Amino acid sequence: MRRSIAYPLVALGAVGSTLAVTSPAFAHGYVSEPPSRQALCASGAVKDCGPIQFEPQSVEGPKGLRSCDGGLAQFSVLADESRNWPAKAVGKTASFTWVMTARHRTSNWEYFVGGKKVATVDGGNQQPDAVVTHNVDLSAFPGRQTVLAVWNIGDTGNAFYNCVDLNVGGGSSDTPKPTPTTPPTAPGTTPPTAPGTTPPTTAPTTGAPATTAPTDSTPGGAKGDWAAGVAYKIGDEVTFDGKKYKCRQSHSSIRSWEPSVFTLALWLPL
């Protein structure tokens, strides 16, 4: 299998030698956050995806489609609903971030839920930035949803397609409810306590008090070297090839997308 990766800084001057053969237009890009299905494949969060794991930016097809795979047989895994794609919890409004690995004039971006268009962002037939973010109101679609994000190219008949699975409002209707932690008592009785004592408090028995604050287990946050298969956040600092970089766009890293290659698009040198 031939692997083809388009690099953003090279593509501006020599796109003809870097684009995948499956994509006739010079533009390439995909939704990195919340992670689209191709982003999940590229990061390794979803396994056995086939060639899309090496070129998440290449799901290109004719304008007007409503498919996750852009009508491309080699990327048909993206339309396979039996995979139970992981869904990210978001609020009523979600921010969709595109990483443009090869920028091209843009007609617009469109967002669909269940075949219904929910947002259009005008591209002005201009070349977009390397990283583009759109805020989309999804309040009318609570629960688990699949959002189809479409990037319509301005001077070709093609578009790029991304499906993003979300739990709108922070959860979904199929999320199981937690079971009660207090054991039931017999009718007409109260929970037993030892004579002359009061019910115990819920203070922890040993060690420091428990906390729900998240911990950062990734190499980001100035903790170590860049690595593939890591979800980096804005502000994370890594070292690569002896140089330090700061993440300027949240994304899931893959091999061949090292900071020295994606400088300015995803990373800023320090």
Image (cartoon, rainbow, N blue to C red):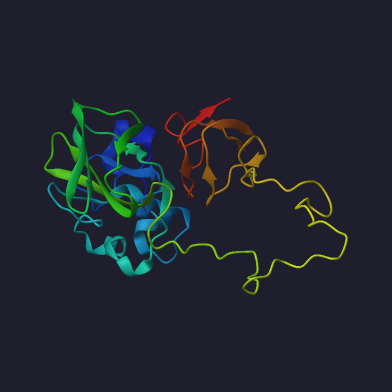
The answer to whether one can see residue 1 in this image is no
Most distant residue in the front direction:
188
Q: To which quarter of the image does residue 269 belong?
A: top right
Tell me residue 118's x, y (percent): 21, 42
Nearest to the observer: residue 214 or residue 27? 214
Where, quadrant-wise, is the N terminus in this rendering? bottom left
Name the quadrant containing residue 41: bottom left
x and y percent of residue 82 in the render?
Answer: 33, 70
Residue lying furthest bottom: 186
Relative height, residue 175 to residue 129 (above, below): below
Residue drawn 13% across and 34% down?
Answer: 155
Q: Residue at x 47, y 38 (%)?
A: 250
The quarter in which the C terminus is drawn is top right
Q: Is residue 41 visible?
A: yes
Q: Is residue 132 left or right of residue 231?
A: left
> As rendered, which of 50 and 47 lies closer to the eye?
47
Which quadrant of the structure image shows residue 197?
Answer: bottom right
- How far across and down, in percent of the image, does residue 49 sit? 38, 63
Expressed as whole percent of the image width and height from the top left, the position of residue 231 reads 52, 46
Left or right: 233 as drawn, with respect to 104: right
